[in-house]
Image (cartoon, rainbow, N blue to C red):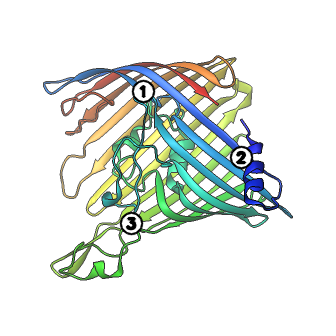
Amino acid sequence: MKKTFVAAAACMAAGVACAQSSVTLFGVLDAAVAYTTGSGPLATSKWQLTNSSNTFSRLGFRGTEDLGGGYAASFWLEAGLQNDTGSGFTTNTNNQSSGNTTLGGLTFNRRSTVSLSGPFGEVRAGRDYTPTFWNTALFDPFGTGGGIGANQIYFSGFGGLTSPTGTRASNSVGYFLPPTLGGFYGQLMYAMGENESRSDIVGLLPTWSHNDGNYVGARVGYLNGPFNIALATGRTTYTLIAANLPVSNNLRVSNIGASYIFESLWSLKLMGEYYDESQGTLDGKGALVGFNLPIGASEIKLSYARYEREPAGNVPKPTSSKVALGYVYNLSKRSAVYATVARISNSNGASQALSGSTTSPNHASTGTEFGMRHAF
């Protein structure tokens, strides 16, 4: 809901004249009852009330000031919420493991940017999505939800959920192409780890390169009617100074995603993603295919994902695969109820499990959830 009077009051309080502007308060609250279980001798199971299973819960503020001539200045502040406990999410201050904050307090971890847009495109500064995450979010039937149907590649890969730059990057400057290029779109991002220059000197702490946490990424795509395709890549620098020599441990992530809407088949949307990552001597590859089928007020989702980790040497490659089926019934434009079932299978020593449970290597994990989502 728009709160234009907030901007007007701020202008009057400051005693200055303001161009036409608006401020919007928005958010999502999502909660679900979930049961997940593993199998094998090490298996555990769990009942829990979770959050963000269909869509990530959030509270945000965004605003735009019209500067005239097609130019605008904007801001965006968006905080993740764990509404099952009333707490917030962590964030990361320097795109490195040393920058992880403690869990519990409200942080604008999802997005915190100021931007200038115009005929040239848009420039953003702050914390924002990395280019590679956009493909993971847009070409998955379950979108950015964090429930048992969530993207298995993103949750299994070392360049996904657990990486400081797997979703967003702090201290970033980004550029977006203007939406007037005949369907072509693109994004560039550079983010800084903000280390001191003396951190390169052996014998001083920390013994990490001053480039640690620096991120560079790009995404380019084409959207024409029902067809959408995008390619993205990104690199995060991690270099340890050991035995007076730098040892590269850079993280590289690349993916390509595509979707097509068949209007003649009830607007059936087919989509898929191919994912490739590497860090040091470890590689990983994954693929996802699925569909989204709207039927009246209902929506059916199905996805199949497979992820394979590739250690150095002639050793087995731990592999996990996941199938998820979801149903959403939209009570209104803002409210919906939903249900999801999912199963993860493991081989070659993998032991991936649905959130809340554990499973033995080479065994399976299954789960069910029922929830409700409300947006405002």
Q: In percent of the image, x 54 and y 61: which residue is there?
A: 126
- 224 to the left or right of 194: right
Furthest-right residue in this view: 69
Quarter holding the N terminus is top right
Classify 10 Å Cα crowding around label 2: few (below 14), some (14-19), many (20 and above): many
As drawn, the label of residue 23 is 2
Q: Quarter of the image holding residue 180? A: bottom right
Residue visible at 50% across and 36% down in the picture:
289
Q: CA distance from mark 3 to mark 1?
A: 32 Å
In what element is the residue under mark 2? strand
- What's the residue at 71%, 40% (across, down)? 226
The label nearer to you, 3 versus 1, is: 1
Sooner in the amino-acid sequence: mark 3 or mark 1: 1
| Mark 3: amino acid | Gly
Residue drawn at x 52%, y 32% as measured from the top left: 142
3 and 1 marks in contact (CB < 8 Å): no
Q: Earlier in the sequence, mark 1 or mark 2?
A: 2
Residue carrying label 3: 213
Quadrant containing the C terminus in the rendered view: top right
Tell me: residue 212, above or below residue 355: below
Which residue bears the numbered disc 1?
A: 84
Measure how far apart labels 1 and 2 are at the Cα level: 28 Å
Location of residue 328 in the rendering, given as x and y in whole percent from the top left corner: 57, 20
**SS at circle 1:** loop
